[in-house]
Image (cartoon, helix red, strand yellow):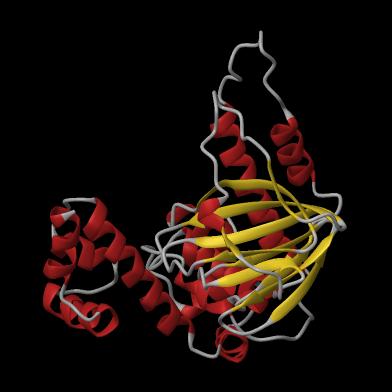
Amino acid sequence: MDALSEVLRLARFAAGVTLDATARSPWCVSVSANAAMGRAHIILEGECALKSSAGGEVALKSGELAYLPRGEAHLIGDPLGAEARPLTALVRSPVAGEMPPVAIGGQGRATRWISLWTSCERHLADPLLAALPPIVKVDLSNASALYWLTDALGLTLSASAAPPIGAAAERARLAELVVIEALSRYVYWLPPGGTGWLAALNDRYVGRALALVHGRPAEPWTVEKLGRQVGLSRSALADHFSHVMGEPIFAYLTRWRLLLAAEFLLSTRRPIAAIAREAGYESAGAFSSAFKRVFGKPPSIWRGRSRRG
């Protein structure tokens, strides 16, 4: 399994549809900041602009998606200077499984857009979230998942029809597929020769090493063993990994194992000593010290979060 898929799986990535809207200029919608929730907007017809409080403004046209992975406050509209209405005031609860479309704005040119939400265990998604820019803009033209989602939203309930079975769950799964497709395209279209986690996914050797480390983190890896798996010598892999990622292999592996340990502490009742061994530490004391450096609190206090919840 590739590293991106493994991070999304372990971080329990989820998505759903917030709004299906047709807007006529002038119109503008404000979206409040929410650090626990990412936001994506897909333009199905027409065009508009988006501006983030984190900096940056992008123009969007039909077939394009803008994704704000860290949930900063932002505006979307045509033009952005129009009086803004809050997104929360436009959201309607699904009726019998059907997502009711919303119409806003004036009498000018029309834009149809879909607003999505995303969520994940953010400490486990840190490699991805830290590497993404504030606004990820992607052309989703010819993406099958987008066609499927549009078709699902186009289904209407007649007066004599039974509620569509599984419609809400279908929209949620399709929304996940759309965002994952957007992330995959964004990574694929990155210019060659770059550095960092996203660029590493496209690298022949580092991408393979990351897939192995993410897929089998508890294995007793050595640089030589990883090198044999990816087709490089020990020294060549060590040098190339450090150049692309900006850190040695085992610094990255250690941090990933600690992120997994943090998740095991929250989601299981396994003894801390057992979790420490899987993270590569011979003693619970050494594990506790390393864990506290990364998460600011010892494992026992971190585990208390789930019990309080």
Nearer to me, 232 or 159: 159
Q: Position of residue 46 (x, y in %)?
A: 86, 57
* Left or right of residue 192: residue 233: left
Give residue 79's quadrant in the image.
Answer: bottom right
Classify the position of the N terminus by image quarter. bottom right
Give residue 165's quadrant in the image.
Answer: top right
- In the displayed structure, 45 sits above or below 211; it is above
Q: State the count of labels.
A: 0
Q: Position of residue 21 (x, y in %)?
A: 70, 48
Q: Residue at point 86% right, 50% down?
A: 142
Q: Position of residue 116 (x, y in %)?
A: 60, 52
- In the displayed structure, 188 sits above or below 165; it is below
* Left or right of residue 261: residue 29: right
* Left or right of residue 5: residue 185: right
Q: Residue at point 35% right, 69% down?
A: 259
Q: Position of residue 151 (x, y in %)?
A: 76, 34
Considering every residue shown, the one lying at the far top of the view is 160
